[in-house]
Image: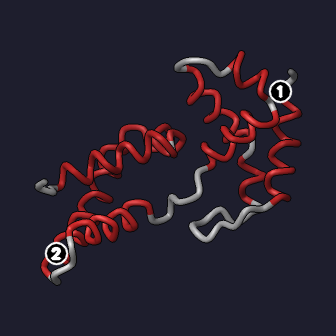
Amino acid sequence: MEIDLDFFELRFAHFLSENHPDIIAEKGDQTKEFIQKKANEAYYIYEEKIKEGTHADAAIECADTSLKEGLIFSKFNFIENILEEYFPLFFKKSLSGNKINDEIIKLINYCKDVFIKYDTTDQYVYSADLETEIIGTLTEIIKE
């Protein structure tokens, strides 16, 4: 398998679409440039690791770490998991099909003041307080 820049662009685009549709929506027209920049950084790391004699799989792993830096915690996934667990009827009825991403993004924006209070960087450690506050905030707008 030949690894090139496109490999990392596709890999990162997939990661964003699965875990951070909110960032895609926020970046809008700049999404492609964001993906290309991160992919370039990852590809450079990959090439350097290969030149050092690192096995290809390990080099890809190092490059992936670079791609995901700053994006380990996903507000999107966090909200989605809370909706599935605590608001299953809302999740099943209201968030079907293509609407799900748009609705969760709206809920993330609604919860932004809560997220600001907590460290949701790559060093995030599960916080029952964050979960409780998000559940409370979502309860205000979701009536099952």
In the figure, 90 relative to 11: above or below?
Answer: above
Measured as percent of width and height from the top left, residue 44 is found at 21, 69
Q: Report the front residue among 1 and 122.
A: 1
Q: CA distance from mark 1 to mark 2?
A: 51 Å
Measured as percent of width and height from the top left, residue 75 is found at 63, 48
Instruction: Say what amino acid the circle numbered 1 marks.
Output: Ile
Where disc 2 sits, the SS reads helix
Name the quadrant of the C terminus: top right
Measured as percent of width and height from the top left, residue 113 is found at 76, 51
- Give the residue displayed 13% in from the left and 54% down from the top: 1
Instruction: Say what amino acid the circle numbered 2 marks.
Output: Ile
Q: In the rendered view, does 36 fall on the left or right side of 142?
A: left
According to the image, what is the colour scheme of the structure?
secondary structure
- Give the residue displayed 36% in from the left and 38% down from the top: 29
Within the image, what quadrant is residue 62 found in? bottom left
**Residue under pointer 1:** 142
In the figure, 10 relative to 97: above or below?
Answer: below
In the figure, 70 relative to 49: above or below?
Answer: above
How many other residues sit within 10 Å of disc 2, few (<14), some (14-19) or many (≥20)?
some
**Residue under pointer 2:** 50
Q: In the rendered view, does 61 fall on the left or right side of 104?
A: left
Within the image, what quadrant is residue 66 found in? bottom left
Looking at the image, tell me whether mark 1 or mark 2 is earlier in sequence order.
Answer: 2
Q: Report the front residue among 29 and 124.
A: 124
In the figure, 126 relative to 1: above or below?
Answer: below
Where disc 1 sits, the SS reads loop
